[in-house]
Image (tube, helix red, strand yellow):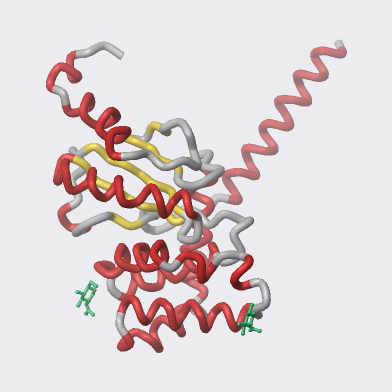
Amino acid sequence: MRSQLTILSLVLLLLVNLKWVVKAQLIPAKFDGFVYGNPKKFNPESILIEAFFDPVCPDTRDSWPPLKQILHLYGSKVSLIVHPFPLPYHDNAFVTSRALHIVNELNSSATYSLWESFFKDQEKFYNKETSNMTRNNILDHVVDFVTKSVGHAYYSDVKSGFSDRKTDLKTRVSFKYGCSRGVFGTPAFFVNGFPLPDVGSSIDYNGWRKIIDPLLSPKREHQSM
Ligand SMILES: *[C@@H]1O[C@H](CO)[C@@H](O)[C@H](O)[C@H]1NC(C)=O
Ligand SMILES: *[C@@H]1O[C@H](CO)[C@@H](O)[C@H](O)[C@H]1NC(C)=O
């Protein structure tokens, strides 16, 4: 009897949780993330890498150059979608991720150069370097930084983007999407939907070759899983 009760309470707990999960998840109108290259040329037949990146995470920064090299090596055979994943212990991760959503909406071709600008000058947004700044100081700092990267003509649009609730919600969707995939650190990578091990560490050029080359081998299609 006791064990039956325990099982029953477990099942009930699970049902309550499931209901909560469905309610709490908002389904966005569009798939989250930023397609690398021209989104119109996105090829659904290609190998899809999904990367979860925090703009102010050093390991994310270090993982970008080899990944970019790999994308250029394989060309249209491999596609990339990057999802911003702001880690809660990086004070400026959410505001910088939001900046990426704002810029992506204004000029999607400028998104990846903004990622690179953040990676290049990441220390400016580290916790220690911004510890004596107010939230408004930081916002001004981010707006200035972003317009330096995308062009001064965008200044007022970038600034007003931060008062637009939609851009806040988009950034929340990115975070929630990462959570729904079980992401807990950055960088995190998925290939054709399957997670790669070693979340939080960079993958070098040879590491990527070892992952992608076998997937492109003609033998692979007939191989049993
Ligand atoms: C959008 O960004 C790209 C890449 O930075 C740039 O070449 C292009 O001129 C920008 N377009 C507009 C309309 O500002
Ligand atoms: C924060 O401290 C630095 C020196 O560590 C100083 O240069 C800067 O002006 C200070 N910023 C503010 C907003 O007080």
Q: In this view of the protein, which residue sits in the foreground, 54 or 62?
A: 62
Residue 32 location, x and y as percent?
Answer: 39, 54
Residue under the image location 43 percent in, 78 percent down: 145
Q: Quadrant of ligand 2?
A: bottom right
Residue 139 location, x and y as percent?
Answer: 54, 79
Horizontal side of 108 relative to 190 (left or right) equals left
Q: Is residue 184 above or below residue 148?
A: above
Q: Which quadrant holds residue 77? A: top left
Q: Quadrant of the C terminus?
A: top left
Residue under the image location 33 percent in, 39 percent down: 204
Horizontal side of 152 relative to 2 (left or right) equals left
Q: In this view of the protein, which residue sits in the foreground, 175 or 75?
A: 75
Residue 146 location, x and y as percent?
Answer: 40, 77
Q: Is residue 94 above or below residue 25?
A: below
Residue 131 location, x and y as percent?
Answer: 66, 72
Q: In this view of the protein, which residue sits in the foreground, 65 or 109?
A: 65
Residue under the image location 30 percent in, 82 percent down: 151
Q: Is residue 189 above or below residue 54?
A: above
Horizontal side of 62 relative to 212 (left or right) equals right
Q: Is residue 200 above or below residue 217?
A: below
Residue under the image location 20 percent in, 50 percent down: 42
Q: Residue furthest right?
A: 2
Image mark count: 0
